[in-house]
Every structure is written in structure tokens, then in C-alpha cells.
Amino acid sequence: MACVLTEDMTEVAFPPVRAVVFDMDGLMFNTEVVFNASGTELLRRRGKSPHPELFLRMMGRRAPDAFAVMMELMELTEPYEVLKQESESIFFEMLDEIVAPMPGLFTLLDRIEAAGLPKGVATSSTRKYLGDMLARFDLTHRFDVTLGAEDVTHGKPDPEIYLTAARRLDIDPAAMMVLEDSEAGTRAAAAAGAQIISVPHEHCSGHDYSMAVAVASRLDDPVVLNRIGPECSE
């Protein structure tokens, strides 16, 4: 067995990691900054300011579910399709000036590849957006499996997307390390039985990560890298 060192410095045994699956928004790229800015602008145009819990509750969910939260909390009556189209227009106007890889991403990818482990992406965003984001940073060829919103019936926090990723990688979910920034994604991976490591950022500090096996400060945190490297003794 390999070991994870928890926050209280105790070792917990798990099967050796045989594959690594990444969430995307807020985990691989700083796009949560753009989502929050575009959502704030969408509401400003309607004379509203975001509810304190709005973006926390939207994070990690597929667009229909996220906008349902916004419509309820912000008392918006316009159709989902109208809000989504305008929001996307604002988002892509802001994206080029803001988007960047999250700290440690390329170090971690290199480490996983050196270990010969397959990699995947499992995002609540659409396949087209997923493809565009990976291509933007020349990452498309570095992933063996990519899953978007259209690939599942139920979005996060339902475990379907991570169970699907495990099937496509042909591994037991218990041998799959999942990296997530949101509570919804963490719950999805935990429910799938994966080895979930949460990597919070400034926009999700209020989320509950108690179901994760560990919480990392960034993608190249030792708590992540050590799971890719040599196994510790039982």
C-alpha cells in the first residue's frame, strides 16, 4: 500500500495510484476568477450585487445547475438561455486578459508523465470549452481521457463523471487520484471512491473538504507529488 500524510500528520494507506484525473476550472486554470468577474458584471447590468454565497454555491456545477442557483438566490426571472448567452459573451471578453495556469500545473504533469501514469480531465464545463482551454495551453495531447458536461447524465456532486473516468481508464476508482478545487467536485470524487485531494483557492475558502483524503496548497504540493513518487512502506 501507498500512504497519504493527512493534516494531523498521520499516515493513511491507500492502493497505489494508477491514474490521475483533474478537474479543470479553478484547478488547472484560474478561470474561477473570470467566472466570478463575468457573473458580477451580468448582475451589475441588472442593478444587483452578488449574494455572499452565490459563487460558492455555483462552483463546480454544470451550467444549468449553476444558473439555477443564481436565478434562485438573485431572484432573476429571465430564461436560462438568455442569461447563459450573455454570461458567456462577457466571460470570453474577459478571458484572454485574465486566464493563466494554476501554480504547479506543469510540474505535476511532468511528474505524472515521468511515472508513466495515465491522466484525465473531468469537468462540468462543455466539451467544446474543455477542448479550447486545453488547446490554448498546448495540453490536448497530454491527456488520455477527457470528459465534459455532455458525457454524463448527472453533474457533480453526483459521482457519475468520476466513475465514468475510471471505466475509461480501465482502473478501480480506489486507484485513481482526483484533484478538485470545489466542494461539489470533492463530494463527487469521494462518492466515486477515488483518492480525492482538494486544492482550494481564494474563491472557495468557505467550502467543506472534510471528505477529501488530503488538502493541498497548490498542484505541486508534496502531498500531491508524494502520491506520484515512490511508495512508502506499510
Image (tube, rainbow, N blue to C red):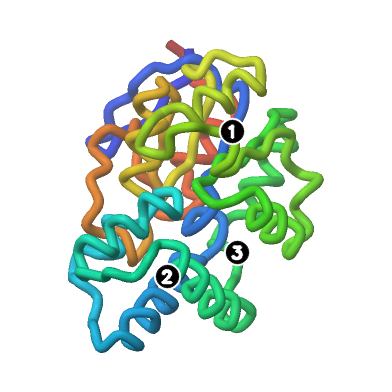
- Is residue 194 left or right of 19 when viewed as pictured? left
- Is residue 162 left or right of 146 when viewed as pictured? left
- Is residue 113 left or right of 205 when viewed as pictured? right
Query: Residue beneath label 1, please?
Result: 20
User: Whole-percent x and y of residue 109?
Assistant: 67, 46
Query: Residue beneath label 2, please?
Result: 83
| Residue ID at (62%, 47%) | 108
User: Whole-percent x and y of residue 31?
Assistant: 51, 66
Local crowd at mark 1 within 10 Å, few (<14), some, or many (≥20)? many
Task: Between residue 105 and residue 138, name the one nearer to us.
Answer: 138
| Quadrant in which residue 112 is drawn | top right
Mark 2 or 3, nearer chain start: 2
Foreground tag (2 vs 1): 2
The answer to whether residue 45 is above or below residue 35 is below
SS label for mark 2: helix
Local crowd at mark 2 within 10 Å, few (<14), some, or many (≥20)? some
